[in-house]
Image: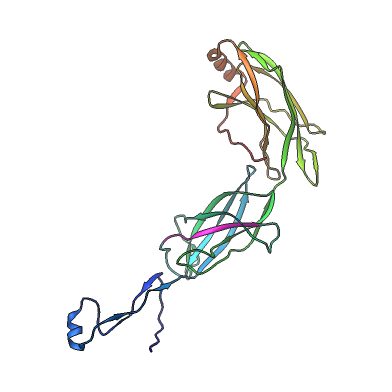
Amino acid sequence: MYTVSFADDDPGPLYVYAGGLPGNTFLNEILAETWVATPYVHVTLPLTITRLRATLSRFAILTLTGCLIAGNVDFPRPPVLQAEYATTPSGPWHILTTVQGVRPGNCGTTAVYGEPFRYRVPVALASAYYRLSGASAADFEPAVSQVVHEAKTLTRITNFTISPRTVTTKGTVITVSGRLWKDTKGWHPLVGQSVWIMFRYKGVWYYFRHEPKTSASGRFSGKFTAYLGGPFVAEYMGSKAYFASTTTQLKVKATGRSAAALAHGVSRSLWPAASSARPVR
C-alpha cells in the first residue's frame, strides 16, 4: 500500500512503476526485480465557464461569449459544451445544441487565465433563460455557467396582397399591402415600422427603395413599378425589441424581354439585396 500527492496540470493517463522503468535493464539488474504498471488512471481538469454574455439578434440567433478556464493550463482540446435553455432561471433545462471551440487570445486573470469563446446558436423561444453546461465534457470536471436571459417580441405580417399579379417588362404599377402585428399578450398592431418589399430574380433578391410604413392599425401599402416577375415577399427587419418576420411568397408573372427590364428597374427603383436571410416566424 502506498499514497502519494502531487500537482498535475495535464489530463490523460498516469502510470506508476515499481522496481525500475520500462526499457531500463540496468535498474532491473541491480534491483533484480521486474517493473509493474498500475491500471489506467484518467485525470480530469477543473473547468470553469465565466463571464457569460448573450446577445439575441432580430433573426433569432443567440450569440454567447465568455471565458473557459481549465485549471491554469492551455486546453489540450476545447471541451464540447451543451447550450441549454429554460423558461425559468432555475430550470428545468433543455438542450438547445452542442458547441465547441475557443478563440485566439487569453481571458481571465494573470493568476488564472483561460481562452475566450463565441458561439452562435438558433433560439427556441421568444423569451428564455440560457446557460452553458460542461457536465459531459471528456477530460474535464462538470461545470455550469451563470444564467442569462434574452427576449424579443414576436411579429408577423398578415393580409399580404399584390395587385395586379401580371406585369410587363416595360413597367407596371403594382399595389402591395399587408398588416404588421406584435405578440404582446395577444396580437396587436405594430405601428410606425418600415416594411421591405422584395422579389427574387435568377437567384438574386432585390428590394424596392421605397419602404412603406405601418399605420396606427398596423397596415401598410405602397405602389411600385415592377419590371420583372418572380416570387415577392414583404419583410419586416425587426429591431432591438422585435423579431423580424416575413410573408409567404406571392408569384408575379411578367411578359416581355427581361434583360432590358432588369437594367432599367435597378437603375430607377431597385437595389440588389445583400442577402436573402429569412427571419423565423
**Which residues lie in the magenta part?**
77-85
Q: Position of residue 185 (x, y in %)?
A: 80, 47
Residue 96 located left or right of residue 4: right
- Foreground of the two, 183 or 40: 40
Residue at 64% in and 49% down: 124
- Foreground of the two, 252 or 151: 252
Residue 85 located left or right of residue 36: right
Q: Quadrant of residue 273?
A: top right
Can residue 117 be seen from the camera position used here? yes
Residue at 67% in and 62% down: 92
Quarter occupied by the N terminus: bottom left
Q: Based on the picture, tell me whether residue 84 belongs to the magenta stretch.
A: yes
Residue 219 located left or right of residue 59: right
Q: Quadrant of residue 219?
A: top right
Can residue 208 be seen from the camera position used here? no
Q: Position of residue 64 (x, y in %)?
A: 57, 54
Q: Main secondary structure of the magenta part?
A: strand
Quarter occupied by the C terminus: top right
Residue at 57% in and 18% down: 267
Q: Position of residue 177 (x, y in %)?
A: 74, 25
Q: Position of residue 235 (x, y in %)?
A: 67, 32
Residue 181 located left or right of residue 224: right
Q: Based on the picture, tell me whether residue 35 belongs to the magenta stretch.
A: no
